[in-house]
Image: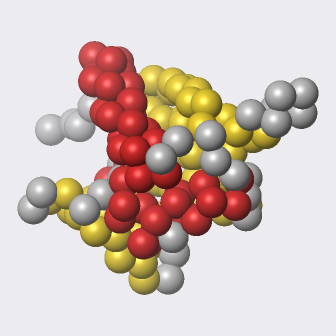
Amino acid sequence: MATIVSEKVKFDLEFLLKTSPRVLDNMIGTPSGLSEWFADNVNIKDDEYTFFWDGSMQSARLISRKPNAGIRFQWLEDEEEGLDTYFEITITVDPMTKAVILTVTDFAEEDEVEESRRLWEKQISNLKRVLGA
């Protein structure tokens, strides 16, 4: 029996945050920072991050990290399926306004994009609450 891997769709979300890139970098790149807004708990072993939520867990490989600029992960499940997908959180500062913009790039099944967007919006809302931004 052949398995059919459905195509995942890439999407981006942008959020304006009232904080500094340095503070944001700590929140997206460290287990303690990620545990405050993204997951209930986060463990790291080498380049593998394990995220825990309400009794479930999911692991991702750290693909790249640029201090004060962003981080990119790939879920191990997608890696095992040979998918060229990732989720990335980047930090940019608008040169004119000095506003800090957080961009989330992720992939989801076509029929799950809206649900994934809502989930990220909820997560970033948690991040804003933690930052007081």
Considering depth in this image, is 102 or 116 the residue closer to the camera? 102
Q: Position of residue 28 (x, y in %)?
A: 53, 58
Considering depth in this image, is 119 or 85 the residue closer to the camera? 119
Q: Is residue 22 left or right of residue 78?
A: right
Q: Which quadrant would residue 109 be assigned to in this image?
A: top left
Q: Is residue 44 left or right of residue 99?
A: left
Considering depth in this image, is 61 or 53 the residue closer to the camera? 53
Total numbered circles? 0
Q: Position of residue 80 (x, y in %)?
A: 37, 56
Q: Position of residue 32 (x, y in %)?
A: 42, 72
Up/down of 122 relative to 19, above or below: above
Q: Is residue 81 left or right of residue 95?
A: left
For the question of whether residue 90 can be seen, the reply is no
Residue shown at the point (67%, 35%) measured from the top left: 101
Residue shown at the point (49%, 51%) measured from the top left: 131
Q: Outermost residue toward the right? A: 96
Residue shown at the point (89%, 33%) measured from the top left: 95
Residue shown at the point (22%, 36%) measured from the top left: 2
